Amino acid sequence: MKTLLTLTFFLLALNCFAQKDKIYKSIDEAKQNSKMVFELDLSEKNLIEIPKEIEGFKNLKKLNLSQNNLSKVDESFKFPKSLEVLNLNANNLSDFSICKLPNLKVLQLNFNKISKFNPKIENIVNVEYLGLMENSLNELLPTIGKLSKLRELQLDKNQISELPQELNTIKTLEKITLSANKLSQIPENLTVKYIDLSLNYFDKISTSLLNKNLLYILLSGNRNIISLNNIEANNEYSGVIDLRYIDFKYEEKKLLNEKLKNATIIFNNDELQMYKIKNGQSFEIKVN
């Protein structure tokens, strides 16, 4: 009898673990076992509004609503408080606000039409990854500094010309990508390890840009960096400076290496490939 009970308990536990790994692909399927829905993928369903049934999935942790036709998300929709990952990539969102989600770690809003990111920050205060790539942002509001646990921020391909000083208050921030914006400067002494500033309007490399925490700075395609007089000598910085797609002559490259003698400077794709092979560095930040 004891053996039978042990076996029954084992099978129940095994079924529970299997349910946690299951990815539900439709609302109808999920409704049949609502308490055991931990991950729901409703991408590419041509949705124009978020199904109300989602509010009833009280244990939901991951929700994928990408590649639909959603034009509005606001606080009136009560996502489950258990939610940790919300993917709203590639919709038609022009504005965005959200209910309080104390467990949310990953918020993906890439490839939308958002012109101002201004939700109640206290509703998403524990977010670690925020994706706003390819939207219509022309500014980043100072309230971003309240995301005290943020580790990675993606802002590529917007129209941002200035960053708020409040970014300096986020001590957990490790990676920012800002390629293809309208930046010519950033707040001094950011504590990030990796920053992508490619395809912007930088015309100089200052000492304040190369702080001691920075491992890799990507400045490729900033064609205004053409004068070595605009590059300050810095013997302390020992990270990587990526200057691909800027037309430096051989003698200029030599002088630049002397000005930044402890840095690794990458001038072309071959040098980048050699650096990756030699160092095997990756700047992917995983958020569980």
Image (tube, rainbow, N blue to C red):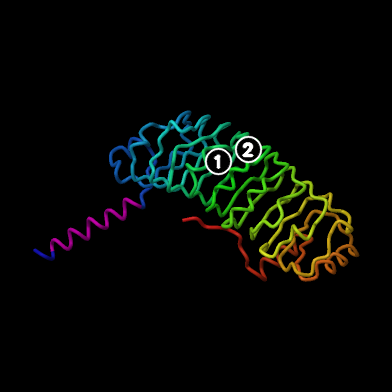
- Crowding at dot 2, Cα within 10 Å, few <14 / some 14-19 / many 20+, comes out as many
Query: x, y percentage for residue 103?
Result: 43, 48
Residue 107, relative to residue 196: is it above or below? above
Q: Quadrant of residue 54?
A: top left
Closer to us: 149 or 60: 149
In the picture, measured across the screen, residue 209 lies left or right of residue 121, that is right
Instruction: Please name the amino acid that badge 2 sits on.
Output: Asn
Helix or strand or loop: what does disc 2 sit on? loop
- Badge 1 amino acid: Leu
Farthest residue, direction left: 1
Mark 2 lies on residue: 135
Check the image and name the residue furthest to the right.
251
* Mark 1 → mark 2, Cα distance in angstroms: 8 Å
Percent of width and height locating residue 176: 64, 52
Q: x, y percentage for residue 199?
A: 75, 48
Report the residue at 36% width, 36% height from top. Answer: 55
Say which label, 1 or 2, has the lower sequence index. Answer: 1
Residue 9 inside the magenta-drawn segment: yes
What range of the chain is rendered magenta? 4-20
Vertical position of residue 188 compared to residue 69: above or below: below
Please say if the residues under marks 1 and 2 sit with CB atoms less than 8 Å apart: yes
Residue 109 shown left or right of residue 223 in the figure? left
Against 194, is 48 above or below? above
Question: Residue tagged by mark 1?
Answer: 109
Left or right, 271 with respect to 156, comes to right
Q: Position of residue 36 (x, y in %)?
A: 30, 46
Secondary structure character of the magenta stretch overall? helix
Occupied quadrant, residue 251: bottom right
Q: Residue at x 48, y 37 (%)?
A: 98
* Left or right: where 45 falls relative to 148: left
Q: Is 240 contained in the magenta span? A: no
